Image (cartoon, rainbow, N blue to C red):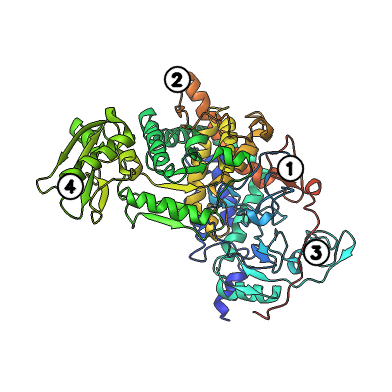
Amino acid sequence: MGSKYRRLLRRNTDDEENEDELLNFMEDDPHSSVGHTGTRESQTTSHRGQEKDHVQDVIHCKGARGLKADGRHNRAIDKPSLTSSTSVDEEGRLVTDSEEDDVDDFVGETALHSFMTDGCEENTPSERARALGKDGRRGRWSSACAEDELSEKGDVSTDGPCGDGTAEGKPHSSARLYSCDACSNAIFTTHAALLAHVEERHADITPDYTRLRRVAEKLSTVWTRALNARRDTITLWGTKIFSVAAQRDAGEAKMKEAHRARAQLECVVRRWNDKARVFIFGSSVAMGVWDGMADIDFAVVDVDAMEANAWPPLEKNAVRSITELLRRAGFSFVNLEPISHARVPIIKHHASSPILTVARREAEDVVSRSVRFVLDAPATREDRVLLEGSVRDSVGAAGVQQVWWNRTGEMMSVTLDSTTAAMRAATCSPALISPSLRAKVQPVHDECRPELYNIDFDLSFRAFGIRNSILLQKYLLSHPCARPGAIVLKDWSKTSGVNNSVNGYFTSYAINIMWIYYLVQKGYVPYVDPLEIPESLVNYTEFDPKYTPMVDPKLTSARLEELYKEAGDMLVGFFYFYSFEFDWGNHVVSLNRPGITTKKALGWHIEDVGSIVPLGIG
């Protein structure tokens, strides 16, 4: 092990003078920015793929991460009720206190990066940003600490969830695995082996993490003075928050394109199940806007079957069947990605070109409402009549505006009265007399075509995301700064590396839950009981989400200035809340009940570790 790494690990006091200057600079200089997240420190701690993350305190116990997302982004509140909640615990994991579902149903393993302003990442003296592992046998996600190191500091109790002794007076002797948060496949059986790995592989970044933590601790003592000194800057941040959010609002016309895409997809789905309906959920519902570029989440649900507890179906077969129907309707094999072997099977569509951002001309609109049937041989007169009749039967006689054939009789083009009717025609079953004839359906043009072809979407068969989206919508629409703040936090989480569920970090849904929980605790938005959202979809009518402008056009200039100031305060307060106020040792983030939810109330204060056989790794 090179001496270079040892020297870097011992570097604890080189930047003391710079830290003091930084604090004075943030308090006094009116032209500096407390919240600039582009500093080397925040960039260094955010890139896990480059092994640029805080390592010394971020340690996985009881197993490696290795859990893929597999469509689990929206399982945070499977059943919004008092028996199931989304929570982020002391170690930064996203879990649930459901009495029915196993914790492994969630994308739960995360390491929370509580970033302070000026790019400073704060873990507080309790060292709460330890990452998680997975029990070797039971597959249940739970927390564990780097006990060898933390017990010396008094942060670990031998009879608590992180100790090696007993839990509630019951001893256990389970073997543990340790994994490094900065590496994807590094697993060790001893804490000493993990520390040796950190010293050898990540010694160059641990001093930066230590320095950031010291700066944040010093900043907490002068927080109020720093805010007062930076009042103008914080208000400017609020202005930028609204500016960024307004860019995601493409207007009501764009939202209607999403509505038409939903109706077109339903035409395809009903070829598979004539009672199934297609629902939109996710950010376009929660935010009330769609920018035309983000992907749309669709859920296919047979409401009657769900009421009879016969839904979802065998999802693997459903994915294959609907994928085949989409391909018959002209969707490219390259752009469609059926994921049938995931825990939650889904169909992903990657559009080759986005929806046109300018208004279509009349000729382009006509082309987008047209489809063509390409035959592998010239059609006879009888074949032509039957094929045209098949299209008219599927869309109605009034829906067909024009039909024409090429000279050889090998291609028929049809113009319909709407893009949805065009999709319905593309999914019809063509009737032909000649047994050797085969008809291939495709849009007339590669760009001017029905909306569904030009959007990115994910299609699943679970209904829980619908209710979750309604819950978030009720929260985010209750305050004019809630949606802009959520959008900016989502962007920050992705650029900083915190939003990375594939590698065990947060999902966008988890970021929204934390944001809303903070707003509720600070009294910005009222609490919404999940039981107010009906579990049944029998009377559900909001298949097409209602458009709500990101910024109310009726707001006066004076009111906007007030909102800019409030938005800046709310965003800064979010980081301060999770850095210094939230009790990571005893509380959890939960929207399932008003007030504060404790770990003890959920039984999370007792460590549950399954026995595993030591693998002798590391």
471 or 39, which lies in front?
471
- Left/right of residue 520 with respect to residue 320 in the rendered view: right
Secondary element at tag 2? helix
The reply to whether the C-beta atoms of the residues labelled 1 and 3 are less than 8 Å apart is no
Question: Image height check: is 567 above or below 71?
Answer: above
Query: Element type at marker 3?
Result: loop
Which quadrant does the C terminus fall into? bottom right
Residue at the image point whose x is 49% and y is 40% from the top: 276
Q: Which residue is mark 3?
A: 163
Inspect this view and state whether residue 572 appears: no
Numbered mark located on residue 557 in the image: 2
Residue 411 is marked as 4
Instruction: Decide: is 606 above or below 422.
Output: below
Tag nearer the camera, 2 or 4: 4
Is the residue marked by circle 2 packed among few (<14), some (14-19), or many (20+) residues within 10 Å? few
Dots 2, 3 in contact, CB < 8 A? no
Marks 1 and 2: which is nearer the front? 1
- The amino acid at mark 4 is Met
**Outermost right residue:** 169
Which label's residue is closer to the chain start, 1 or 3?
Answer: 1
* Quadrant position of residue 425: top left
Image quarter in which the N terminus is found: bottom right
Whether tag 4 and tag 3 are in contact, CB under 8 A, the answer is no
Please say if the residues under marks 4 and 1 sit with CB atoms less than 8 Å apart.
no
Q: Measuring 37% from the left and 49% from the top, which residue is drawn there?
A: 326
Badge 3 amino acid: Gly
> Which residue, given by chain and number where applicable, does mark 1 sit on?
83
Foreground mark, 1 or 3? 1
In the structure shown, which secondary structural element does the residue marked by tag 4 occupy? strand
Give the alpha-carbon distance from disc 4 to disc 1, as whole Å.
59 Å
Picture quadrant of residue 414: top left
